[in-house]
Image (cartoon, rainbow, N blue to C red):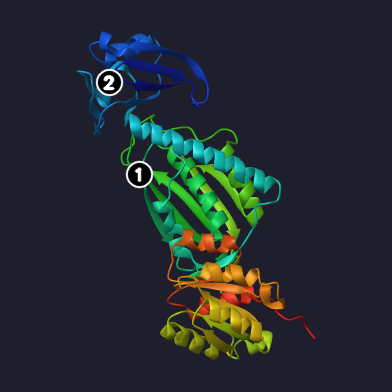
Amino acid sequence: MILAGDIGGTNARLALYDDDGKRVLRSETFESRAHRGLEPIVAAFLGRDRPKAAALGVAGPVVDDRCRATNLPWLIDGRALGRRLGIPKVALLNDLVAIATAAHALETMVQDVTDLASATEGELKFRPVTAVIRPELEVLAGLPLPLDAPREPEIVVEIAPEVPEFGQFDPILLRKCLTHLCAVVLNGLPPGSQPAIDLRCALAPGRRDRLRLTIAGHSPAPAAGQGQNPPSGETLALSLVYRVAEVMGARAAILRAPDGSPVARIELPFVTVPEPPATGAEAVYGRLRALVVDDIATNRFVLIQLLRALRIEADEAGGGGDALEKLAGGEFDLVLLDMNMPDMDGEATFREIRAAGAPWAEIPVVALTADAVALKRDYYLALGLNGFVSKPVDRRLLWAEILSAVPRPPPL
């Protein structure tokens, strides 16, 4: 059983849930000021029941599991309360934090339902892009995880030496899976501890075309018997993970460590970024002509030199209006478009290209931007851009995005 409570200056509301926290067994409301403290209220409510954990939202600042209640002459000590009443773990939450946590959980649940429906109906698309692996994994440390209780886990990323620096995979779908798998692992750790996650990335055994990601959690000096049970059934979050993994051609699983804590694993397709051929784009496309659109002349010069080294012909435009004129008057196979231009920015230029109603309206467009943040790239790709390269431009990433964005000519 799990005890939950909302402790305010007027009323103290307590509820006892089953072990999964999904079904209310009983509940009761007490008048706060009629009692000398929280302990006699909890003791009267529990009777002979002894929950395995308690989460109490209290009106007042919480520091080191202690709270001086607002509008009440109470000092609430979570550890002392648990010790005297035989509750292995008591977590005190500021009531506003508890509300924010519940709101985030509801938002996450709604998004999960939407994503699961999209995946089931075939609307969730697999869009592999060229990316650097480490930052795609480290971005997890800054993302909110759908946890049962507020925690600030440390996420340590370890990448095996044999894993290439670059690769092609779908970072958006992978991130959906990893956030939920990390949450499953963290929710299986003892409550109240300062948790950490080891996220290990390696090539799948005997394969160079698949990545294996393993997520293991640990807590410093966990007390015996305080571990949580891994999910026994398929929760909404796990249903989403399995469905998204299927869309990616990946496999996900929840395993058990020797101590009974959950360990998550996912294997996914991974394409190594090839080195550009010695003969450049001519070996793949024959003639290829690109339009470089950037308001900074130095950026255009550097990119044109990279393209010429790849044996790609290049012309340049200093802004969105100039680019539209050159597309209307010339023949191009690809547009490399800076997204952060003044006046007509990259997004507006892209929309004008697609709305032109001309034969070149569907030309492949690759975004160029200093916004290396993964979520910003996701936004650009969701607009319909064909690729994304962050500045400073890496020759291998540029070549991989060109290969992905520009269809190869049919064999003769």
Q: Position of residue 193 (x, y in %)?
A: 33, 37
Is 376 situated left or right of 219 in this image? right
Seen in the picture, residue 98 relative to 248 is either above or below; the reply is above
- Which residue is drawn at the image coordinates 26% and 12% (left, top)? 33
Label 2 element class:
helix
Corner quadrant of residue 53: top left
**Quick one: 314 or 208, which is closer to the camera?**
314
Quadrant placement of the C terminus: bottom right
Q: CA distance from mark 1 to mark 2?
A: 24 Å
- Label located before the other in sequence (1 or 2): 2
Q: Position of residue 133 (x, y in %)?
A: 48, 64
Residue mark closest to the camera, 1 vs 2? 1
Is 352 situated left or right of 221 in this image? right
Are dots 1 and 2 in contact, CB under 8 Å? no
Q: Position of residue 364 (x, y in %)?
A: 63, 74
Q: Amino acid at mark 1?
A: Glu
Q: Position of residue 11 (x, y in %)?
A: 34, 15
Residue highlighted by disc 2: 81
Seen in the picture, residue 233 relative to 177 is either above or below; the reply is above
- Which residue is drawn at the image coordinates 70% and 76% (left, top)? 358
Q: Amino acid at mark 2?
A: Leu
Label 1 element class:
loop
Residue highlighted by disc 1: 152
